Amino acid sequence: MMKYLAHQWKFRFTLILLISIMLSVLLVQLDLTLWAEQINQQGFSHGVEEGKKMPSALKYILPFVKEIVLICVPMFITLLLMKFWASLKRKR
């Protein structure tokens, strides 16, 4: 296991770091758009209409869903890009 982790670790670390930085820059740019300003001014209510209460279970579940999406989506994009890159290297 450690042999595999040590194999090309600098390249893999650099690749993951660069992809993370690019995603962060894109999210910062998204935060500066008029669309994001409008959402910040209006607030967000998780799809609950005015006057209706959100079920209490959702108050505990939705933060976990948000974290799973924000962590797993970039992770899967990175894994797909790395597999694609590896397949291109094998074809050469």
Image (cartoon, rainbow, N blue to C red):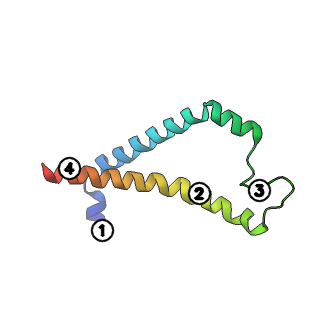
> Label 4, on which residue?
88
Q: Residues within 10 Å of mark 3 (few under 14, many from 20)?
A: few
Q: CA distance from mark 4 to mark 1?
A: 25 Å
Label 3 or label 4, whichever lies nearer to me, is 3
**What is the x, y in percent for residue 27?**
54, 39
Badge 1 or badge 3: first in the primary sequence = 1
Mark 2 is on which residue type? Glu
Secondary element under disc 3, as helix, strand or loop, is loop
Badge 3 or badge 2: first in the primary sequence = 3
**Residue at image point 35% right, 54% down:** 80
**Residue at image point 30% right, 65% down:** 2
> Label 3, on which residue?
48
Mark 4 is on which residue type? Leu
Label 3 or label 2, whichever lies nearer to me, is 3
Residue sitting nearer the eye, 78 or 18: 78
> Label 2, on which residue?
67
Label 2 or label 1, whichever lies nearer to me, is 2
Badge 4 or badge 2: first in the primary sequence = 2
Mark 1 is on which residue type? Met
Q: CA distance from mark 1 to mark 3?
A: 48 Å
Q: Quadrant of residue 34?
A: top right
| CB contact under 8 Å: marks 1 and 3 | no
Which label belongs to residue 1? Answer: 1
**What is the x, y in percent for residue 31?**
60, 35
Image mark count:
4
Secondary element under disc 4, as helix, strand or loop, is helix
